[in-house]
Amino acid sequence: MRNVVYLEHIEQAEALLKPQRIDVLRQLAEPRSCTEVAAELDQTPQRVYYHVKRLLEAGLVGQVAERRVRGIHEGIYQAAGRSYWLSPALVGRIGLRQTRDQLSLGYLVDLMEDVQADVAALDLTRPDLPSIAISGDIRVAPDQRQAFLDDLQRTLQELFTRHGGATGDAFRLAVACYPKEAPDDRTSDDPA
């Protein structure tokens, strides 16, 4: 079972995005037969098999074993991944990808699509893949925003310069910095 299954084909998305199939897929986090899943979901085995068959055809589920029960061969199935990501390419880009200012939210959206595709392409079952993820909130006064962004850009540029080169393992560094509304900021009537 992979950590992430990246759905790039519309047929895969169509097979997955049905509430009953998502329920079946969740039951198949561990290897189970259609009869076992049917008992959990209060469905008939035939109905569950119909959904499992569609998920199999889309590559979202795999048959991991088979057993003989009362003279009948019964398949044991398991989900192909722990999570499923839909590629933004499924909808397709509306309009052309534009070169935007690095401080625009449009640039951030394009960058996040690239990062999602890059991560999905990695072999996430390998425990030796080095990576780091850091997240945190920073509060910056409005009159200090530009200074903060300039410091961030300068710090990252120094890192790129210091570790840039043509040899060694290639890493991609993507830093996302965007405004975050606090829950009370959205409901406040105070214009300040």
Image (cartoon, helix red, strand yellow):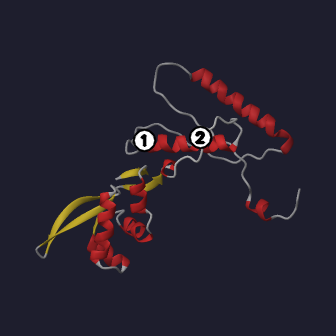
Based on the displayed image, in which of its 4 quarters is residue 151 positioned? top right
| Of marks 2 and 1, the one in the foreground | 2
Q: Which class describes the residues within 10 Å of circle 1: few (<14), some (14-19), or many (20+)? A: few
Q: Looking at the image, which residue is at 36% across and 62% down? A: 29
- The amino acid at mark 2 is Leu
In percent of width and height, residue 53 lies at: 29, 65
Would residue 8 be found to the left or right of residue 136 on screen? left
Work out whether 114 lies above or below 91: above
Q: Which mark, residue 103?
A: none
> Helix, strand or loop at disc 1?
helix
Residue at which label 2 appears: 96
Q: Disc 2 versus disc 1: distance between alpha carbons?
A: 24 Å
Q: Which class describes the residues within 10 Å of circle 2: few (<14), some (14-19), or many (20+)? A: few
Q: Residue furthest left?
A: 71
Q: Looking at the image, which residue is at 59% across and 40% down? A: 96
Residue at which label 1 appears: 121
In percent of width and height, residue 26 lies at: 40, 66
> Helix, strand or loop at disc 2?
loop
The answer to whether one can see residue 63 in this image is yes
Work out whether 100 lies above or below 180: above
Q: Which of the two labelled residues, at mark 2 and mark 1, occupies the earlier sequence position?
A: 2
- The amino acid at mark 1 is Ala
In percent of width and height, residue 93 lies at: 55, 46
Q: Residue furthest top?
A: 166
Q: In this rendered view, identify the residue nearer to me: 137 or 145.
A: 145
Would residue 81 be found to the left or right of residue 66 on screen? right
Q: Quadrant of the C terminus?
A: bottom right
